[in-house]
């Protein structure tokens, strides 16, 4: 079956521009996560969506970052007024509804490589 | 608070040799532990995970890991390395707080396999 897909695969933008990154989770997966992978910081959690519950936004590094999940499926991560330090690979993951939270496997997409010039 | 430490940012082995990638965790509650592998320009793929039960966990591609509570370790091993094992490996612990679940990753270990 289809895995998690992300678009675009690469994005080059100029400092100060806004960007939108898209994630299509695996069908039927109720949980969706965004992570950021950068040389200096490693893999960092950004945001978590679960069904209709309020998202956990505790990992978003600044108010320039926001994310939405429409209809419980597709998610968009938006970065406003991009800065050079936003350059990283943004990974999306989804997991199925599980009986014991925290043990469910997260399935990762290939990521979007963002370069801010 | 949960955290993960991976010893060695780079590990180099010969083809056919034992692979040992080290992971130590810190957790105030019984941990859920994961190993993921990342091939170049790809996302992360689950190798194996420990939740409860048997402490020796077998995963894909011949990898296994043993949960040792007394040592707070979850080292990844493979008896015989293949060239195709060259990749970056991440150990992670699941952080559960207020019905939110996230993975806390170690800094990763890049495995190099010499012919």
Image: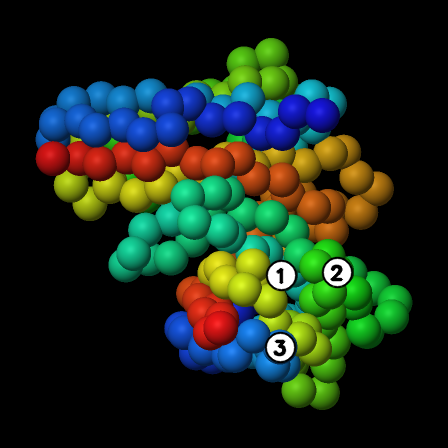
Q: Chain of mark 2?
A: B
Report whether residue A58 is seen. Answer: no
Q: For residue A72, which quarter of the picture?
A: top right
Task: Identify the residue position indicated by label 1 in the image.
Answer: B35
Q: For residue A63, which quarter of the picture?
A: top left
Task: Identify the residue position indicated by label 2 in the image.
Answer: B59
Local packing at callout 1 (Cα closer than 10 Å; few below 14, some 14-19, many 20+) is many
| Residue A32 x %, y % | 58, 32
- Image point 58% across, 29% down: which residue? A4
| Above or below, comparing residue A79 to residue B5 in the picture | above
SS of the residue under disc 1: strand
Query: In this orientation, which residue lies closer to the viewer: A100 or A86?
Result: A86
Label 1 or label 2, whichever comes before in sequence order: 1
The residue furthest front is: B115
| Above or below, comparing residue A20 to residue A82 in the picture | above
Task: Identify the residue position indicated by label 3 in the image.
Answer: B16
SS of the residue under disc 3: loop
Q: For residue B69, which quarter of the picture?
A: bottom right
| Residue A83 x %, y % | 16, 37
């Amino acid at each position: 079956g289809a895995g998690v897909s992300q678009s675009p695969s690469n994005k080059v933008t100029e400092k100060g521009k806004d960007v939108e990154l898209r994630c299509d989770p695996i069908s039927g997966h109720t949980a969706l996560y965004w992570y950021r992978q950068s040389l200096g910081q490693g893999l960092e959690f950004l945001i978590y969506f679960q069904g209709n519950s309020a998202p956990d936004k505790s990992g978003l590094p600044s108010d320039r970052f926001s994310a939405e999940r429409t209809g419980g499926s597709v998610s968009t991560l938006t970065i406003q007024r991009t800065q050079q330090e936003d350059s990283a690979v943004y990974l999306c993951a989804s997991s199925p509804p599980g009986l014991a939270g925290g043990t469910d496997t997260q399935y990762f997409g290939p990521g979007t490589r963002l370069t801010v010039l | 608070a949960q955290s993960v430490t991976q010893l060695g940012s780079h590990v180099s082995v010969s083809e056919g040799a034992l692979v040992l990638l080290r992971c130590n965790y810190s957790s105030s509650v019984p941990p859920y532990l994961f190993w993921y592998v990342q091939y170049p320009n790809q996302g992360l793929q689950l190798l194996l995970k420990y939740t409860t039960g048997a402490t020796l966990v077998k995963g894909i591609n011949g990898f296994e890991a043993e949960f040792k509570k007394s040592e707070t370790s979850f080292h990844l091993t493979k008896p015989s390395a293949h060239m195709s094992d060259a990749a970056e490996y991440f150990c992670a612990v699941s952080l559960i707080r207020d019905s939110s679940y996230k993975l806390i990753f170690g800094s990763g270990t890049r495995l190099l396999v010499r012919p």
